[in-house]
Amino acid sequence: MEIDQRITGDVTARLVKATTAVDACRTAVKVLGERTPAMITVLLHVRDQLRLVAATGSWQVYAALRPGTGVCWRVFRAGKTDVVTAVDADPDYVSLGPSVAVEICAPILDRAGRPIGVFNVEWPDPIDVDSWHEVVEEIAKRLGVRIDELSGTPGETRSDMLLRHAAAMTGAATEHELLTLALQAAREVAGLDSAILVMSTSSGARVCSGTDPATGLEARLRERLMADDADLDGILTRARRHGASYSIGDPAEYDPHGLEELTEVGVRTMIAIPIGPEVTGGALLVVDEAVSRPDPSTVNQLGLLAAQAWTSLDRLRTLERLHERASSDPLTGLRHHGPFGERLLAATPGRTALLAIDVDEFKAINDTYGHQAGDRVLVDLARALETALRNGDELYRIGGDEFVAVVEVQRADEAVNIAERLAGAARRTGRTISIGVAMQGRGESSELTLRRADSALYGVKREGRNGVRLADPVA
């Protein structure tokens, strides 16, 4: 049709003048927008999203569409034009406000026929679908050729990159996952080969790492900074005192200012960014073997990245502390009823023994010396009992002066020996305890095992306290 040729000819003529892919997209939208009252958008594929690069005719549009969202993603994946004449019945249609009578979405293909984006047009009133189908498809085709001529779709901007990494770090579930994401982000934002994080801890500065295996320069640098003679405190002091810094020139020609332990393993370019507060924070080091001159804007972006990493790290540590408080007895620090119930669910019949423990004459201590003295006794006993247990054994406080130890053993006599060791540890604090021991039988619930341990405990109490008794095995 004549209208088709006029529109597509005008688009082609103006696309020749476009100097960038974004400019080409805006040109196509502008030309078509002058010929029809439609809502027009061009979305190009950048990483895992379809990102909006040009639009007209709508008060609000989505900046990006996540995978699988809307008709646009359906068209992008299929690589074929789609026409929707009943938007309410289309399961993928995404409404932005104005009513739509017809949507025509065409894939933008490069010269090899690969989808690189979509050209989407929506009309509020009915149209001649056949003629406009040809127009939209032809514009998308010519736009794809021009974008390909202009070196393809635009890459991810630095702002987009920072936003992507910030979102990933915010969603990290563990500290190791967060550190891995932060170090990956630092390498990508800086464009340098390696990154490490040096953090303050209660026992001094240490090198923190994520789950990615270190290779090359990063492996050598970590090994050097984890050596006994490494001056990690000096690196942290420098970063805290002076803030972000970066290298200019080859250290072979300039004095590396006390950073020789870095340059001796091959560091030729370095950006150092302080992270977190002085007492608990650290320094992010992003380095490379090649000599380059980092751009100051890149250093600033790394500073923003480091701030986000610290915020995410602080959030994870706060959640961990809150979980620990919710899971432990505030007086003794031992785990309490909730975690004890979870541990019982993981018990192994025939291998798990429960040791029910009660402090002898504890009520008399409280009545005679007061609850503060009683609390001190409980704290001292908890420490003594924990010390007497083997590595892997677990101790819980499940009541006022009631404790339960969960131990994994091969035979009942091993569990009795452990109980005797606990009784001895208690006596060394000047107190005595009574202990009932029960091996969980096959097919026996943990609750029944605990009742048998309690029954054995009260047997000790009846016989004068300060002893250990093994419960009879399950019949």
Image (cartoon, helix red, strand yellow):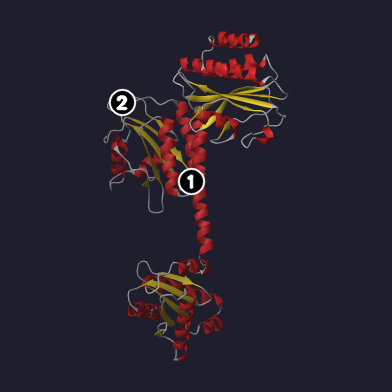
Q: In which quarter of the image is the C terminus?
A: bottom left
Q: In which quarter of the image is the N terminus?
A: top right
Task: Indicate the quadrant where residue 189 lies.
Answer: top left
Q: Is residue 445 above or below residue 59?
A: below
| Kind of element beneath mark 1 | loop
Depth check: 347 or 427 in front?
347
- In the picture, measured across the screen, residue 231 lies left or right of residue 186, that is left
Task: Indicate the quadrant where residue 262 lies.
Answer: top left
- In the picture, measured across the screen, residue 74 lies left or right of residue 439, that is right
Of the residues shown, which amino acid type is indicated by label 2?
Asp
Q: Is residue 430 visible?
A: no
Q: Which residue lies furthest to the bottom in this view?
A: 463
Q: Is residue 313 visible?
A: yes
Q: Is residue 443 above or below residue 84?
A: below
Image coordinates of residue 79 in percent, x first then y, are: 51, 27
Q: Name the residue under label 1.
A: 172
Q: Is residue 358 above or below residue 7?
A: below
Depth check: 448 or 258 in front?
448
| Kind of element beneath mark 2 | loop
Depth check: 6 or 435 in front?
6
Task: Indicate the quadrant where residue 272 lies.
Answer: top left
How much space separates mark 2 and mark 1, taking CA atoms? Answer: 37 Å
Q: Mark 2 points at which residue?
A: 250
Image coordinates of residue 109 in percent, x first then y, are: 50, 21
Depth check: 380 or 352 in front?
352
> Which residue: 50% across, 48% down?
314
Image coordinates of residue 457 in percent, x first then y, are: 45, 84
Pointer 1 local density, CA inside 10 Å: few below 14, some 14–19, many at least 20: some
Image coordinates of residue 376 in percent, x first then y, are: 49, 74
Of the residues shown, which amino acid type is indicated by label 1?
Ala
Mark 2 or 1: the one toward you: 1
Which tag, 2 or 1, sits closer to the chain's start? 1
